[in-house]
Amino acid sequence: MEYRNLPGTGLRVSELCLGTMTFGEQTDEREAHAQLDCAVAHGVNFVDTAEMYPVPPGPKTYSRTESIVGNWLARQPRDKLVVATKVAGPGRDRPWVRGGETAFSKKNIRWAVDDSLKRLRTDFVDLYQLHWPERNVAMFGTMRYDATKEKPATPILEQIEAMDELVRAGKIRHYGLSNETSWGVCEFARLAKVHGLPPPVTIQNAYSLVNRTFEWDLAEACHRESVALLAYSPLAMGVLAGKYLGGAKPEGARLAVFPSFGERYQRALVKEATAEYVRVARDAGLPPEAMALAYVRSRPFVAATILGARTLAQLEANLATRAITLGADVLAAIEAVNARYPSPSAGL
């Protein structure tokens, strides 16, 4: 396992991070703990969760994932692990999240982190992330910014001040962004500099063979502001494994169980592009998911690739791909497909 330093921090994270979005919904606690044990045994020291998990979110499952991770974390040497979680922001009506108090005010962020620490059974989290922007942005598969949807939002400076207070209180070590835009990254960084406050150190956005929008302008913004990408959905919710080709719906698979949850990965052009990527992988003698993960892992702006698995067998297969390096011919073939199907699942 390779390890990488998150810029501006003392955090050294494994290049593969265990995502926990399925824990408590498709993956029960026993299986979840087996995945955590397996990941650590393979050298993974980075675990990512969120108060909103598992997803799709709902009042009966809200925060269950953090509790499952916390029950495992309580038995681990805390100083050997990098634990990340996220505070949920406003959006759809979700009264079960702090009684609907989801604006990123100082009060709500303090409230959220205290609840997460209790569930995680730890005194601090290494990385605390704003799960999505509070302001109006194009995200979760939406491709166009719509100024007519502007709405009141907590000032970004107040959000940074809240994170600074948590750092000084010892409740978090660093903070990051998620599902963020280039303007957002630059504004967080600018305000932090102007006011002598800590800047964000990471951004967790979707990045895969069928969504390379990060490369357009976010890559430059993050490079100049020393913000590292934590790439989620590197397999596009399993689509890039090729298991949905030809209209297949494997029993228990995420998009078979929750067909409306990953709509951006079910577009016609995504299916066409996936078929081409599967062909490239098979011509190279590689499992399609191995090629997809190896590609994301190889990008210089990716600090960690987040693996999400429903079963232990899936996780073991994905962990085994870390030894794969793509040759120039495979990379050229990938670029040829991308030229025909540029980011068909585009959207933050």
Image: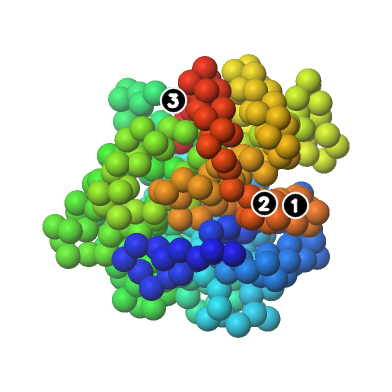
Q: Quadrant of residue 216?
A: top left
Judging from the image, the colouring scheme is rainbow
Circle 3: element type: loop
Name the kind of residue labelled 3 in the image: Met
**Tag 1 or tag 3, which sits nearer the N-term?**
3
Name the kind of residue labelled 2 in the image: Thr
Residue 127 appears anywhere in the view: no
Name the kind of residue labelled 1 in the image: Ala
Q: Which residue corresponds to mark 3?
A: 143
Q: Which residue corresponds to mark 1?
A: 317
Mark 1 and mark 2 residues within 8 Å of each other at the beta carbon: yes
Q: Residue at x 50, y 40 (%)?
A: 207
Q: Residue at x 52, y 17 (%)?
A: 340
Q: Which residue corresponds to mark 2?
A: 321
The image shows residue 10, relative to residue 195, as above or below, that is: below
Question: Residue 64: image x %, image y %?
Answer: 67, 59
Circle 2: element type: helix
Mark 2 and mark 3 residues within 8 Å of each other at the beta carbon: no
The image shows residue 212, relative to residue 299, as above or below, that is: above
- Marks 1/2: CA–CA distance: 7 Å
